[in-house]
Image (cartoon, rainbow, N blue to C red):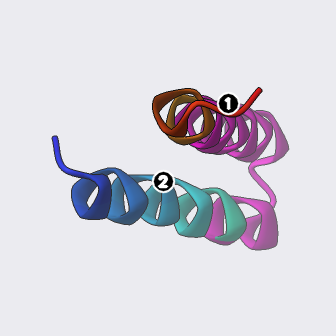
Amino acid sequence: MTDLQKDFLTGAIFMTGLVGFISGEFIISSTLFASAAIASSLSFSRKKTSVGQY
């Protein structure tokens, strides 16, 4: 996957979690928010490592 595709996927997961939170599905939205945060964190750390920074 390219970086743009990963960004879109992370954004879609976040937006789905937001809609779930608004509609009252707290367990599902919490899981989606956590997966979006983990995906974003992994993507960010890989970018820093590929550049050579720690």
Q: Amino acid at mark 2?
A: Thr
* Quadrant including the N terminus: top left
Residue 54: where, in percent of width, then height?
77, 26
Give the residue at x 27% y 64%.
4
Taking depth in this image into account, of 5 and 50 the one nearest to the observer is 50
Give the residue at x 41% y 60%.
7
Q: Residue 10 vs residue 45: left or right? A: left
Q: Which residue is mark 1?
A: 38
Asked if 47 appears above or below 2 in the picture, the reply is above
Q: Where is residue 22, by image quadrant?
A: bottom right
Q: Which residue is mark 2?
A: 10
As for residue 16 lying within the magenta part, the answer is no
Q: In the rendered structure, which segment of residues is drawn in magenta?
A: 19-45
Q: Amino acid at mark 1?
A: Ile
Using a 10 Å C-alpha cutoff, classify the residue at mark 1 as few (fewer than 14 neighbours), some (14 to 19) or many (20 or more): few
Q: Where is residue 33, by image quadrant?
A: top right
| Disc 1 to disc 2, C-alpha distance | 9 Å
Taking depth in this image into account, of 24 and 15 the one nearest to the observer is 15
Q: Residue furthest left?
A: 1
Q: Residue furthest front?
A: 52
Residue 51: where, in percent of width, then height?
51, 39
Residue 17: where, in percent of width, then height?
64, 56
Q: Residue 15 vs residue 20: left or right? A: left
Element under disc 2: helix
Element under disc 1: helix
Residue 39: where, in percent of width, then height?
56, 35
